Amino acid sequence: MKDEKINESDKKDNKTAKDVEENRAITFLSYLGFLCLIPLLAKKESKFAQFHAKQGLVLLIAWIIGGITIGMGIGLVINAGVVIFSIIGLINVNDGNVNDLPIIGDLAKKINI
């Protein structure tokens, strides 16, 4: 019985690793502005791509808000945060990690597409 659980876990890990390897290239687009829509719409079956694309979509919305509020000074802070979070997201994609970005991750989980 114990061996069966290990085997199921191994299968799940292999499936996840396969998902990451097959979709890593397109998932990089998730953190590049409007390009986040490509993995969001084209890779609906990939949990890895969807996770990062949804975070990228939240960052895109924040970037747009930052652009609108740039004259008030707060837009610079928002856009700087978007750049920093995008870099962290790209590093996570490169490493094959599924880590929530601070603040962004919670908002992205609420997106159902």
Image (cartoon, rainbow, N blue to C red):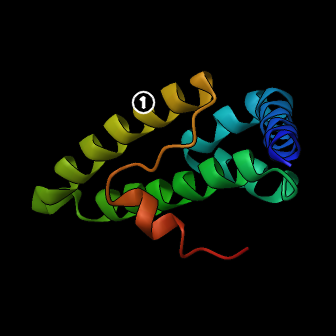
Q: Please name the residue shown 32% across and 35% down the image.
A: 84
**Horizontal and vertical percent position of residue 90:** 53, 30
Quarter placement of the C terminus: bottom right
**Nearest to the observer: residue 24 or residue 36:** 24
Which of the two residues, 50 or 99, is positioned nearer the viewer here?
99
Closer to the camera, 92 or 85? 92
Mark 1 Cα within 10 Å, few/some/many (few <14, many 20+)? some
Above or below 5: residue 84: above
Q: Quadrant of residue 85?
A: top left
Q: In which quarter of the image is residue 8?
A: top right
Residue type, mark 1 in image: Ile
Q: Which residue is drawn at 87% across and 38% down?
A: 7
Residue 97 is left or right of residue 87, and the answer is right
Comparing 48 with 41, the one in front is 48
Residue at numbered disc 1: 87
Residue placed at 55% from the left, 46% from the top?
33
